[in-house]
Amino acid sequence: SHLLGGTYLLSKLLVPQVQKADEGRIVIVTSGGMYNYKLPSWDALTSSDKSAKFDGVSAYAYAKRGQVLLAERWAKEFPDVKFATVHPGWSDTNAVDEAFGDAKKYLNPLREPWEGAEGICWMVGTKSSNLQSGELYLDRAVQPKHISGPFFTEGSFTKNSEAEVDDFLKRMKEAAEM
């Protein structure tokens, strides 16, 4: 999956090179699709339980939540490297319809792809001193990582425990054979 190969493995392989760079950083493009989900058990994350019905919206959200957790943890593990996740915002797509249904009205105004790309480009091009390692960004600003509270405020329903994150990282390392 893109979480294992594209985020975990690629980022881990990049760390030594980024540590040598003056303005290095690892920027991970995630999605607001993760806001309604915490990272599930390894079996659910990897669809190991073949009797369970596959849910593409949940699988996508789990991977995106995993990216945010990786950046948070790596920011602590590698303090000399800036890690940040960036959410490009919501566009009017079939995926947004499927994930949010009637609640997508709360995401308005929906945006054009270039608007999301602008924030990502800023993350890559700005001085690393402008970035807070381990944080989630949207439109050049740090955002809450969990909005399961009332009126889209910071909540705890989607937060994983340290033990859950430890297990996730251990299993990612094993899966990547690192």
Image (cartoon, grey):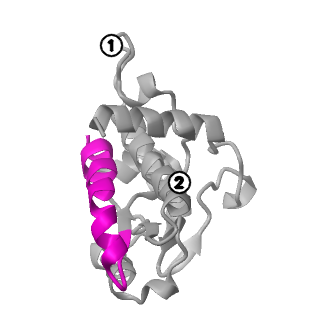
The residue closer to the viewer here, 70 or 170, is 170
Q: Quick check: 139 above or below 30?
A: below
- Residue at 37%, 68% (x, y): give it: 27
Q: Position of residue 80 (x, y in %)?
A: 47, 72
**Mark 2 or 1: the one toward you:** 2
- Frontmost residue, 146 versus 178: 178
Mark pair 2, 1: CA separation: 30 Å
- Residue 19 on image: x %, y %: 36, 72
Hey, which quadrant is residue 82 in on the image? bottom left
128 shown above or below 61: below
Secondary structure type for disc 1: loop
Q: Is residue 21 magenta?
A: yes
156 or 106: nearer the eye?
A: 156
Using the image, determine if residue 39 lies above or below residue 28.
above
Q: Which residue is mark 2?
A: 73
- Residue beneath label 1, please? 50
Q: Position of residue 95 (x, y in %)?
A: 33, 49
The span picked out in magenta is 1-26
The residue under label 2 is which amino acid type? Arg
Callout 2: 10 Å neighbours few (<14), some, many (20+)? some
Q: Secondary structure at mark 2?
A: helix
Numbered circle sitting on residue 99? none
Asked if residue 50 lies in the magenta stretch, the reply is no
* Quarter placement of the N terminus: top left
Is residue 3 toward the left or the right of residue 149 in the image?
A: left
